[in-house]
Amino acid sequence: MSLKAIVYVRNPPSLEILNQLLLPHETVYESVTTVQQGYEQIKQMKVRGAPAIGIVAALSLVIDLQLKLQTFNKNPNALDSDILNMMNSPLLLGNFIRDSLDHLNQSRPTAVNLFRTSDILWKATSSGIKKDLGTKQIIESLVDMAEQMLFDDLKDNNNIGKYGVEFILRNGDKRISVVTHCNTGSLATSGYGTALGIIRHLYAQGNLLRAYYTETRPYNQGSRLTSYELLHDKIPSTLICDSMVSALLASNKMDHKIAAIIVGADRVAKNGDTANKIGTYQLAITAKYHNVMFIVAAPSTSIDLKIKNGRDITIEERNEDEVVFVNGLIKQDDTEKYQIKKVRVPPQGVKVWNPSFDVTPAELITAIVTEKGVVEKEKGAKEFDLEKFLMSQ
Ligand code: MRU
């Protein structure tokens, strides 16, 4: 079992992505050498989770550039003339980077991390061009930045875990059970995780009775990926269907007593409205009804101050096949390899709606845990002031 979704090496340059479509049964890493391959990995959800998407976009661009630079240095004649010209011209290199980032931005529309990464890399490129840097220097500055993103994400997740646990335990039981949704762990980030990072931290400190996690239809991030991570770490955990959460909160058996529902985020608007995996909104409603804390755990890079509230967040709609078919993995007779087997459930001709995310209104969120600290609403307020929070850091 491997919990590393992204394996990047600077020298010699290499990028490998764990194909999450084959988890939990097979651990297969796929090599990414071009922007287009990075785009496909994200689009097909072989890698997913807001932070991981942003990091893979950045790394697929830099790996593409590093490999071109390597060939340019060793054997320029092997490059086709367009690439050769580009390696000699910061302006042409800038055009390639701009087009690549635009393309990567088309892969998935909801998580802000992808767009933020693109902005950062593009600003660095245009400032390099303005400063008359050579193509090698521009590429190396982007490589440094992408590596830093990978490193910072892991550090931020550890801090989210620490702040989240302090907040959740601040004036209640010291042995608690929690519910989580989707997969927000090592597989969705550069390591450790956000909401799942809080659960890891609770467990490490001896504060966790049990983590309940939803299967998270239709893509089953919970039953395939969160299960994989929790079993890997031997964290006491129980899988439930998405429709069982209210019944769980209403039940009061010892380790069924839930102190908090903890989820991740794909984009948090300035007022705290939060886009996250479809099904999150209904969890927040049931948490409110049952007087259970509803915690959003996300790096500050998931906060989008340009978006005033959740109405302005674009929600990705995915292919109806994800709803219509149940995927399993079967071994082929003649090989040891697994293959994805799709089984159709509803009859032909059904109409399907498949939004991949929903927006939970700030009003239903108890607190937003970031690597910089925990944000709460001011007394009596229905919304968060995330601009004020970020400015005060
Ligand atoms: O469609 P996915 O699997 O990319 O959706 C993932 C989620 O919704 C996560 O909760 C979110 O990206 C946070 S991951 C740390």
Image (tube, grey):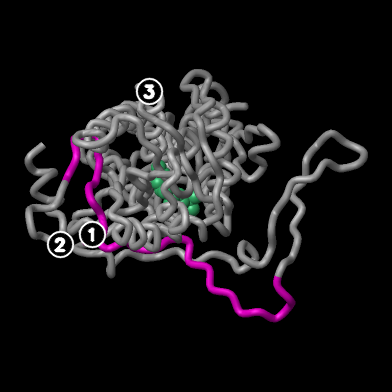
The quarter holding residue 32 reads: top right
- Kindly state the secondary structure of the residue where label 2 is placed: loop
Q: Which residue is mark 2?
A: 382
Q: Amino acid at mark 2?
A: Lys
Report the Cα–Cα distance between label 3 and label 2.
34 Å
Q: Secondary structure at mark 1?
A: helix
Task: Answer whether residue 141 is visible to the viewer in this image.
Answer: no
Question: Which one is in front in this view, the residue at disc 3 or the one at disc 2?
Answer: 3
Q: Residue furthest right?
A: 334
Residue at 61% in and 32% down: 78
Q: CA distance from mark 2 to mark 1?
A: 7 Å
Q: Residue drawn at (52%, 29%), measured in percent from left and top?
A: 4
Determine whether label 2 and label 1 are within 8 Å by CB.
Answer: yes
Q: Is mark 3 within 8 Å of ligand 1?
A: no
The numbered dot on residue 116 is none
355, 365: nearer the viewer:
365
Q: Nearer the viewer, residue 197 or 13?
A: 197
**In the rendered view, would you say 313 is above or below 56?**
below
Task: Report which residue position mark 1 lands on.
Answer: 362
The residue range painted magenta reads 346-375
Q: Residue at x 44, y 38 (%)?
A: 255
Residue 331 placement: quadrant? top right
Q: For this view, does 325 lie left or right of residue 8?
A: right
Residue 206: image tag: 3
- Under mark 3, the amino acid is Gly
Question: Can residue 322 be seen?
Answer: yes
